[in-house]
Amino acid sequence: MAFNSLLPSIVFQEVPGEITLCFSITGCRVGCKGCHSTDLWNEKHGSPLTNSGFSKWIERYQGLISCVLFFGGEWQADALIEKLQIAKAYGLKTCLYSGEKYVDIAITEQLDFLKTGRWVAELGGLDSPSSNQVFRDLCTGKTLNHLFINPSNNTSLSGAENVAA
Ligand code: SF4
């Protein structure tokens, strides 16, 4: 199964301690007020991300990356689960940034990390102590929001808190 994705990029701060290949999936229906990524609302944007195409992206960066991240895609659970299983088969960690508060357990079973919570400007993103958003290590059950806050100057270590979830 396939959903549409923008061109992937390598990111360094969205998943703490990991070098991550990041796919932004189009078709987001969460509709956060003040969303900075409205180009992700139209499911026709981007190109189909087939399983074979996804594997080719991983093989291109194999040895350089340690994790694969999806900005969204939980609205097509089967397509997302297939990609997560492929990533794990390559020995990579997996992460999902979702704007929802809860994510299907069939998806979370395939994840090492999960960010939940819609964008609420007044509360801020993961870099904000008052954020409604939560970043969890699902292997340990621990919340890792503190890793997104720089205690010395209280500036964000992540550029992703209002991107695709
Ligand atoms: S902030 Fe993220 S979850 Fe919210 S509408 Fe925009 S892309 Fe969707």
Image (cartoon, rainbow, N blue to C red):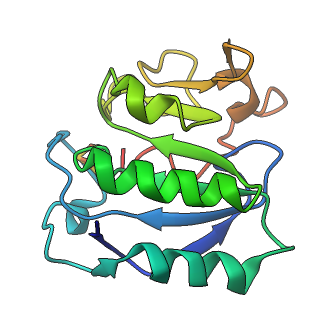
Viewport quadrant of the N terminus: bottom left
> Is 45 situated left or right of 139 in this image?
left
Can residue 35 be seen in this snapshot?
yes
The residue at the point 24 percent across, 50 percent down is 76
Residue 71 seen by the camera: no
Q: Quadrant of the C terminus?
A: top left
Q: How many marks?
A: 0
Q: In the rendering, at what x and y percent does residue 85 appear?
A: 55, 52
Q: In this view, does 155 lie to the left or right of 82?
A: right
- Answer above or below: position of 165 versus 117: below
Image coordinates for residue 7, horizontal then vertical, percent: 45, 81
Measured as percent of width and height from the top left, residue 141 is found at 67, 13
Q: Residue at 65% across / 75% down in the picture?
A: 58
Q: Quadrant of residue 21?
A: bottom right
Give the residue drawn at x 68%, y 45%. 15
Residue at coordinates 65% horizontally, 35% vertically from top-left?
A: 112
**Residue 63 falls left or right of residue 162:** right
Q: Where is residue 34 in the image (x, y as percent from the top left)?
A: 22, 45
